[in-house]
Image (cartoon, rainbow, N blue to C red):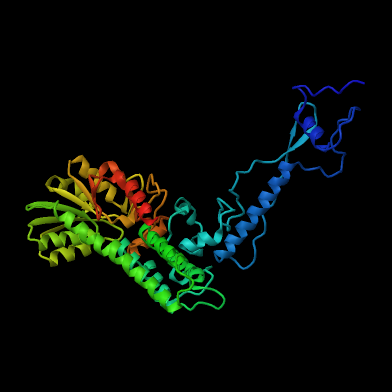
Amino acid sequence: MTEPTPPSPSTPRAFVTHQITSEPTNAPSSSKPQQQRGPPPGEKKILTKAERREIQERQRAEKEALKAQSAKGGAAAKPKPPPKPPQQSATTGGGSTAPVTPSRQRGATKTGTDTPAVTNPRLNLARRASIVGPSDLAVVETLRIFSHFGLPKPLSRLGEGIKGEIHPVIRKLGLQFADFRIVGANARCIATLTAFKTVIQDYITPRGTTLSRHLMTYLSPQISFLTAARPMSVSTGNAIRYLKYEISILSIDLPEQDAKNFMCERIDTFIHERITVADQVIQSLAMEKIYDGDTVLVYARSSVVEKSLLAAKAAGKSFDVIVIDSRPLSEGKRMLISLTSASIPTTYALLPSLPTILPTVSTVMLGAHALHANGSLYSRSGTAMVAMMAKAQGVPVIVCCETYKFSDAVLLDSFMKNELAPNSTSTSMSAKLESRNLQIESLLYDLTPHTNLTALVTEVGLIPATAVPTVLARGIQRAM
């Protein structure tokens, strides 16, 4: 018995398609040749897997479009689904016809004139509506590139989905974080630890458990609420990690009130040693780099840089300060007020004027939000430009930073991790931008490579930026 010959390249395409679809793939092989024929006249055509998938995708896109229209506040009656496009028949060389389905771009479906276009129907509509509101879903598609950033949330929706009781002190602090009333790595860390002291004192251990085992369960929703208000900074994360360690080593035989007092003492010790005393050491070391007649350039506002300049003035040194500032927070204005109140000659300028000012500058002093293991500086947006232009002019760049802001993570650019600042434009300007489907997005931080930094001023001394892993390793050894 002879085997059937396979179809030659000249075999009509429609004939081969009917041959494949008419036989199940899992049918047992037979030695008898199968008769090749198309579907009988009047019988419903058997759809292939690709055609069934295409129909399901079309139906899913129509449902998502209807949901988007209802969220946008469209008409009360549901719009009629669009008529299915007529199938076109293509005649092959053999005279048989095969249905040809028009190709559809994946993720883009046109459902009617009143229905907004859905570029990605699988994108969560609730998340998109939470960014700019349900009335602007058509504009949110441009923000998907920033979806991994810390997006500002409405105060009314703060803490949604968090299980557990939230302490009133934590709620107040979270609202202050979300409203940017407390800014700066040191200020946020101190405010968080101070609030946790109140939470620990008001905590009551449930029956059948111990404080060391249950306290972290109680603190977890408090931490989640603060993180929902604003993404947790590296400094606050290190402080909370220290707090968890201290809770884990508490003795189960220690009375509850004594354990609470011990935890509050450990929090005070961390604030005193890692922030207060560290800032004092940094001030004394930074003063040595300021000489009479110098012109010091600072960017935005850093609490430790501000304290160093005030300490240098109190030591009797005569110098000038140039404060460079930029949007979105314009923190340099607070630095300007503090320095001028201490009778320090200060000039205030915006970031675009930096090239004309740098030739008169002796030293650049910058603050830090975090320092990563590869020596990169993570600080307020605009810091990278200041450091890069200062290096091009041959001006030394000194960074004042406490070691509790060091991170063992590696960051290559400011797009991997960042945060969006609130929109500070006027109402009239915002209306003009919205009429043109435009939005202003301001990133809070940028990344400066270690090659643009001259030295780090820390409580362990003046070190290069590449020494961050060494300091972290020594800290781990001391903890062990």
Camera-side residue of 65 and 445: 445
The residue closer to the viewer here, 34 or 166, is 166
Residue 17 visible from this viewpoint: yes
Q: In the displayed structure, does residue 213 sit left or right of residue 415?
A: right
User: Does residue 93 appear left or right of residue 341 in this picture?
Assistant: right
- The quarter holding residue 116 reads bottom right
Tell me which residue sits at (33%, 57%) in the image.
Answer: 404
- Extreme front residue here? 253
Residue 205 image point, x, y percent: 50, 77
Is residue 82 visible to us here? no
Q: Looking at the image, which is closer to me, 413 or 121?
A: 413
**Quadrant assignment, res 68:** bottom right
Quadrant for the N terminus in the image: top right
Instruction: Estimate the x, y position of residue 291 in percent, counting from the top left.
Output: 9, 52
Answer with the quarter of the image where residue 170 lies. Answer: bottom left
- Taking depth in this image into account, of 66 and 269 the one nearest to the observer is 269
In the rendering, at what x and y percent does residue 242 appear? Answer: 40, 62
> Which image quarter is the C terminus in?
bottom left
Q: How many marks?
A: 0
Position of 457 with respect to 476 (left or right) is left
